Image (cartoon, rainbow, N blue to C red):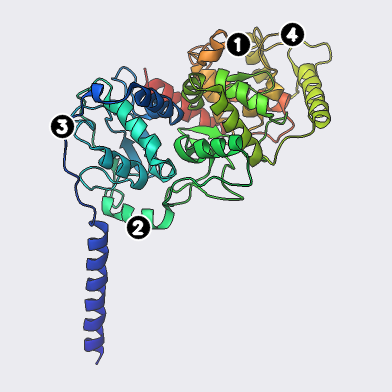
């Protein structure tokens, strides 16, 4: 009797496994095509596709330093291994030159390539699924009108079982929300346009939302847009939990997104810099729409009176803390913090001082962040080049001038001096990680 039950159970498992395999491999290849003649596309459609590709920051991930634009090969570190971005130029052998419009839309909406293979969600098709087919056709026309670049891409560096693409069918079943963006009839046109960009092409939640153990970004309250980590940087929240001392306004966000700089919040750096460079080229109406939607994630704006009162108080406190201000607090007695103050005076105070042109450090989100990652990244790497809209605000790198021990002391001093937050933990580890990254690139 037991043997019979075991055989039945085994048969059932075989049937289930076979069905799952059949389901996961149901995607057929789409026949290759000859690359369309670029002249066959309406120039207006190509121009619109270029703008949409900019909103989607396609070139950021699909271009390596020194490589052809859109030729792929950028290494994306993930908790599961390293994934290399694909070549999306119209090269027929190594790019998407043999892809039909149908194949391109399927990849963008469902994460399935032309040959029927699952794509890894490091490519944010879970956001692109919200984009309309009309907009995807415009992006397709733009990409197919670019110069083809023959570029072979490195194999992904993923261990078992993450190298099994069939498992992604389960990921899609659990986390992929099919269906294009549906406007909210109770919201105005600007808000809906912003929501469409942020939740779709802009895929802002891919960096600004924490991910679960399967690598899926959080959706919905309270975790969506609650901040995360990306490429070793702290990505601040877009919701009302932001650590920014002065609350954001719509115009402040527009300044930051277009110019990469705002007088109450500082300059864009790290993974955000190429994003604002793309937005610098976009329609102001779209950027205002993005800002309107993000403001709604924060619960809306304060009244003008409340905003002015909070901002004035924060600025006054920040200015008194600036180096050289007559009302400066006394230097700390702790030897480590004293060493940090010495490093600050020798390496930072020429620019970051009372009456200087830089934003007061006490207003910068990075100083109030939960760890020292962003401060260490910016200090060691500088901000070079600065965002396109703020080229005169670059910052020199200090990796050569400052030792790791000095960097630890500097970070601890800056945190103590310019914020009321508790001391950062694991600063030594953060400094080692950033130093290793700097040295690997040289």
Which tag, 2 or 1, sits closer to the chain's start?
2
Label 4 SS: loop
Please state the horizontal and vertical placement of residue 304, each as a whole percent of the image: 80, 29
Which tag, 2 or 4, sits closer to the chain's start?
2
Q: Is residue 429 above or below residue 252?
A: below
Give the class, few, some or many, for how many residues have Cα within 10 Å of label 2's Cα (few <14, many ≥20): few
Q: Which residue is mark 2?
A: 170
Q: Which residue is mark 3?
A: 34
Q: CA distance from mark 2 to mark 1?
A: 52 Å
Q: CA distance from mark 3 to mark 2?
A: 33 Å
Q: CA distance from mark 4 to mark 1?
A: 17 Å
Q: Which mark is residue 347?
A: 1
Q: Nearer the viewer, mark 4 or mark 1?
A: 4
Between 343 and 135, which is closer to the camera in this rendering? Answer: 135
Between 178 and 411, which is closer to the camera in this rendering? Answer: 178
Which tag, 4 or 3, sits closer to the chain's start?
3
| 312 on left or right of 341 | right
Q: Residue at 57% of width from left, 17% of height from top?
A: 259
Between 374 and 95, which is closer to the camera in this rendering? Answer: 95
| 29 on left or right of 127 | left
Q: Which residue is mark 4?
A: 355
Give the class, few, some or many, for how many residues have Cα within 10 Å of label 1's Cα (few <14, many ≥20): some
Please state the horizontal and vertical placement of residue 26, each as a whole percent of the image: 23, 57
Please state the horizontal and vertical placement of residue 201, each as a whole percent of the image: 45, 36
């Amino acid at each position: 009797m037991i043997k019979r039950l075991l055989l039945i159970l085994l048969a059932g498992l075989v049937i289930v496994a076979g069905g799952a395999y059949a389901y996961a491999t149901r995607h057929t290849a789409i026949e290759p095509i000859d690359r369309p003649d670029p002249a066959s596309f309406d120039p207006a459609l190509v121009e619109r596709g270029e703008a949409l590709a900019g909103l989607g920051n396609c070139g950021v991930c699909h271009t390596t330093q020194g490589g052809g634009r859109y030729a792929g090969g950028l290494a994306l570190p993930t908790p599961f291994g390293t994934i290399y971005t694909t070549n999306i130029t119209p090269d027929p052998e190594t790019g998407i030159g043999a892809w039909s419009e149908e194949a391109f839309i399927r990849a963008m909406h469902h994460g399935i390539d032309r040959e029927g293979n699952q794509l890894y969600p490091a490519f944010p098709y879970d956001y692109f699924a919200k984009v309309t087919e009309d907009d995807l056709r415009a992006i397709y026309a733009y990409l197919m009108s670019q110069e083809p670049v023959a570029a072979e891409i490195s194999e992904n560096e993923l261990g078992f079982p993450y190298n099994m693409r069939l498992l992604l069918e389960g990921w899609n079943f659990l986390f992929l929300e099919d269906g294009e963006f549906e406007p909210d009839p109770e919201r105005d046109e600007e808000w809906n346009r912003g929501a469409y960009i942020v939740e779709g092409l802009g895929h802002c939640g891919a960096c600004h939302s924490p991910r679960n153990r399967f690598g899926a970004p959080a959706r919905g309250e309270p975790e969506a847009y609650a901040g995360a980590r990306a490429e070793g940087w702290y990505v601040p929240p877009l919701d009302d939990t932001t650590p920014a001392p002065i609350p954001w306004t719509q115009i402040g966000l527009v300044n930051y997104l277009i110019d990469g700089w705002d007088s109450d919040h500082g300059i864009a750096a790290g993974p955000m810099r190429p994003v604002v460079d793309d937005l610098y080229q976009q329609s102001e109406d779209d950027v205002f729409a993005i800002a309107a939607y993000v403001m709604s994630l924060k619960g809306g704006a304060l009244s003008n009176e409340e905003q002015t009162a909070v901002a004035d108080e924060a600025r006054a406190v920040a200015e008194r803390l600036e180096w050289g201000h007559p009302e400066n607090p006394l230097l700390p007695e702790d030897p480590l913090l004293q060493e940090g103050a010495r490093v600050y005076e020798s390496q930072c105070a020429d620019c970051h001082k009372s009456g200087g042109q830089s934003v007061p450090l006490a207003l910068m989100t990075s100083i109030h962040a939960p760890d020292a990652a962003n401060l260490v990244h910016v200090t060691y790497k500088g901000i070079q080049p600065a965002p396109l809209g703020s080229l005169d605000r670059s910052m020199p790198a200090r990796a050569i001038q400052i030792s790791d021990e000095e960097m630890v002391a500097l970070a601890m001093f800056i945190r103590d001096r310019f914020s009321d937050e508790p001391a950062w933990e694991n600063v030594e580890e953060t400094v080692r990680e950033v130093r290793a990254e700097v040295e690997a690139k040289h």
